[in-house]
Image: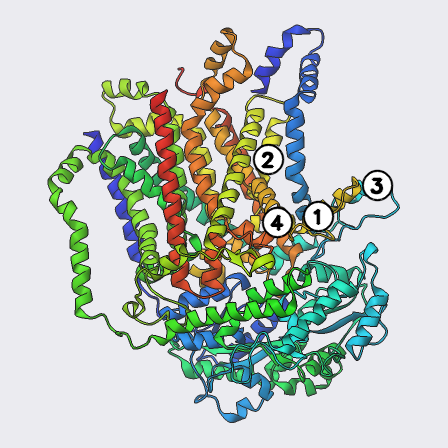
Amino acid sequence: MIETSATRLLGQVFLLLLALVAQLVYAQPREELLLWHGYRGEERRALEQLLEDYNRNQPDARVKALAVPFGSFADKLSAALPRGQGPDLFIFGHDRIGGWARAGNTVAPVDDLVPARVLARFPPSLVEAMRFEGRLYGLPFNFKSTALIYNRALVRHAPETTDELLALARARTDRRRGRFGLAYSYTEPFFHGALLNSFGSGPFDADGRLALDSPGNVRSLEQLARWVREEGILPEEPNSTLVTNLFNQGRAAMVISGPWLLGEISEGIDYAVAPLPQNSESGRPLAPWVAVEGLFLSPWSGRQQAALGLMNYLTGERAALHMAMAGGQLPANLNAYTHPEVARDANTMAFRRQLETAVPIPNLPQMTLLWKPLEKALNKVVKGSASPAGELQRLQREIRRDVANLQAAGDRAGRPRSIPAWAWLGLALLALAALSPALRRRRRIAAAWREHRTAYVYILPAMLGMLLLVFFPLLYGFLLSFTDTTLLNENTPFLSRWQGLGNYASILGDWNFWYGEGAGRSINYDNFYWTLLVTICWTAGNVVLSVGLALVLALALDKPILGRTWFRLLLILPWAIPNYITALVWKGMFHPQFGVVNQALQVVGLAPVAWFDSVGASFMTGLVTNVWLSIPFMMVVILGGLQSIPRDLYEAARVEGAGRWCQFRAITLPLLKPVLVPAIILSVVWTFNMFNVIYLVSDGAPAGANDILITKAFRIGFEKYQYAYAAAYSMVILALLFAYAMWQMRVSRTLEAAR
Amino acid sequence: MTGRTVSSAGPAVPRSPLAGPVRRAAADIFSWRFALLLFAGAVVVYPLLWVVSLAFSGQQSLQLVQLPGDATAWQQLAALIPLPQQWSLENFRAVLTEQPFLRWLLNSLVVSLGTTLVGLALACSAAYAFSRFSFPGRDRGLVLFLISQMFPAVLMLIPLYVIVVQWLGLGNSWLGLVLVYAITALPFCVWMLKGYFDTLPYEIEESALLEGASRFTIFYRIILPLARPAIAVTGLFSFMTAWNEFILASIFMDDEALYTVPVGLRFFVSDYASEWGYFAAGAILVSLPVILLFLSLQRFLVAGLSSGAVKG
């Protein structure tokens, strides 16, 4: 009888939860104008002051701002906007306009809504940056470009040409003492833009067609390779943190960076900003890319006029002045620069002058496909593992294929817009087919339910949760994998994207194991089977090491020892601290020039290792980091498991004369198994899908050779924007892991039976 | 616990009350276990020292290591130990005052504790059924739990958004986050607890059943207390699942006052410039509650069956 009361209790708890859910299910009416932005620090304060001021004067159109961290802003927008949710207005970089406009439902064109007098506030190049296929999407708010920032103690006058720059840099470089004439993140395409554009070509030709292997682009890569490899004036493996560091310690005489660096320069450094010099090899000025932060209007906004009023206010002269003076921003409204207080600031004016030669990042959807592959290519070229011309030709072929994939999906617009009747019929038939075994066995199911009701009731809440929050998303992914969904046709009706098994065929039928011919032949690291091999090695290596080491540590901690509590606490710390920062610390420790690992190797008289240049070494960096990160968890699990082993068993064994090893084999390991086996299965699954460590530490270096399946799926989904292909990739991952889990369970069951 | 070990080692040298513990400590220090733990501790701590020294440096980026060329090997090694040039609490002050960090910390606590409660409630009951009953679909059910961990989380983002925000209307509420996190942590918890329940002797339950106790009483009064070590581990795991999650929290929440602390931490990182000093200070603050939680759970990890109810 008490049994039924227990089930009733569980049922009541569940109902309570449901009621809670239901209570929250009503949309609150919204009066305010919502603005999402990614600003922080002083720029954020400046913006908020402006909004406060606006709210004071416009009581009927209150604005509410939401700051979103940079790392999730794009995801948040693309989750909310196409579904009719999200803000009325948002501030974002202009380079995604093309993708948004093509996909639809994300951003509203404003050319009919904005009067010409407002547009006259901005320089034509910045307005042009906001245009895509003839329509205007949003207003420019601020812009960011790079310029030359130099240490005045080391460089008297800013160089006028790259020849001067080189001569200066050579004089200031002393690699043995870690001093460099010039430092910038030269492997990032955004920074390489300055060299690239100075040859006049850029990634696209005049008609917007991809032209990566144009002679000008090849020359820009050759020039960079010379700077890095022959002149040696640049540090290895640069990133923005390293560049800031070098400049702050007076180890870098000049850096190429943007206004964001100014806030981080140490007080002791006397610096100045100048526009980038003229490229002596092309006779044109270095032309950095400029990113325009635009004010965009949501197509779903019910308060368009109020939103436009705010856009007008924020781009006005007063607001622009405030953003420049209080926020340290470079406003797109050029009138701000005529104000005496702004005009007196030589640094701001240098960035303003740089705008004359700067080139807005192309806002074509193809551009977003370019960043990562181009970065990979730049890395290869500066490390000498590829020639500029050959690499750019390869890249041109690769990107053209990606673009074709993206557009092929977008072009098939002739398909049915709504779901035809036969599809419903098919669906109904499918559902019937799925249900029929259940219907046929309904007697047995009903009997099983009656007989084992207690068991089912215990499991039901968990299963319902799983059904809703795991299996629905899974079904979505499953269905998506049979389509050709990409960024460009994401918002078209589902059926018009259906393509069957095509994605699976192209993943599993990927037999291109090699690049090139004859002696120049190398492994094709993009190949699915190579990635699978790396993933298996990665998983096996990690699980064996982390379980083994965790077991040793847990055993060492199981019996009392001096400072046991402290050791236990110490050893779980890597789990407690967010792994985002510790993974990056490990990456820093493996830096070839300034990393501790190489410094320590040198202290003991060994040669430094270029950690990210070879497949094996780069694999090691990820392995070490991940083992370090996963030991604590494993150790805690095993410590918990060790507690279930009755102590008297050991005493009995000792009486029988069993040694330590014998006790471990005969008692500890078998009795730990019920805890260890699920932990191992799960840790295999997690390591197989361990995205963060690979992404943050080696980032697949060199050239994607160390990508595992999950990072590959991510790159396909979020760097190539082929969502359906990524979903199919994920389904393959799921199938592989499922097969593994079934095998593992069968093995442990047969072992159990054999005993 | 310490008291017992001391007294058991004591009788050999009864001269001074201190001699026992001292000898014991000396024996510990020279054991291989201690050496191993010391070494492991050093390896674990070294990268964390970088985080700590960055947090206390008052600056946003670390001093670069550059070996003094003409120093002795010993000096060179000393140069590898990360210590800030001057100690400062500036980063902590900025993190705590420039943003509603404590508020976010509190939000995270609510969400994480909610996740732990919901997750444990669901997991304990399910795991108990999987461990103690045999019913049709038991094995398949267990495998179903596993599947959820096999699909890459990044690709679940959009469907989860649709379900939680659009269907359930739980956008911008902690309940939505709690549900998602609890379900995310569920597979591990169920498997872990089931494994642990399997190790508990069935005889106790049988005798309790014979005495007329209901299943629920047995579950609640006998099994759960016995399984404390496993519950501590799974509870910690559920807590951590919610504690460090960033992307869903920032996508579901549309109000800065409702952000959780990992979202707040990510404000310090962007594509252009990142304030790593603030991030490090914030990361240390974020890990403090976890450490406290672990400290309070420790006694469950050491006091299991050996001192538990079975013997009594």
* Quadrant placement of the C terminus of chain A: top left
Q: Residue at x 43, y 89 (%)?
A: A112
- Chain ID of residue with mark 1: A
Q: CA distance from mark 2 to mark 4?
A: 26 Å
Q: Are marks 3 and 2 on the same chain?
A: no
Name the mark on residue A571.
2
Q: Compared to A528, does B303 lie above or below?
A: above
- Residue under pointer 3: B75
- Residue under pointer 1: A609
Name the mark on residue A618.
4
Callout 4 amino acid: Ser
The picture places residue A177, in percent across and down from the top left corner, at: 83, 55
Please identify, in this view, whether the residue under mark 3 or under mark 2 is nearer the observer. Answer: 3
Disc 3 packing (10 Å; few <14; some 14–19; many ≥20) = few
Callout 2 amino acid: Leu
| For marks 1 and 4 on the same chain, the one whose residue lies earlier in the sequence | 1
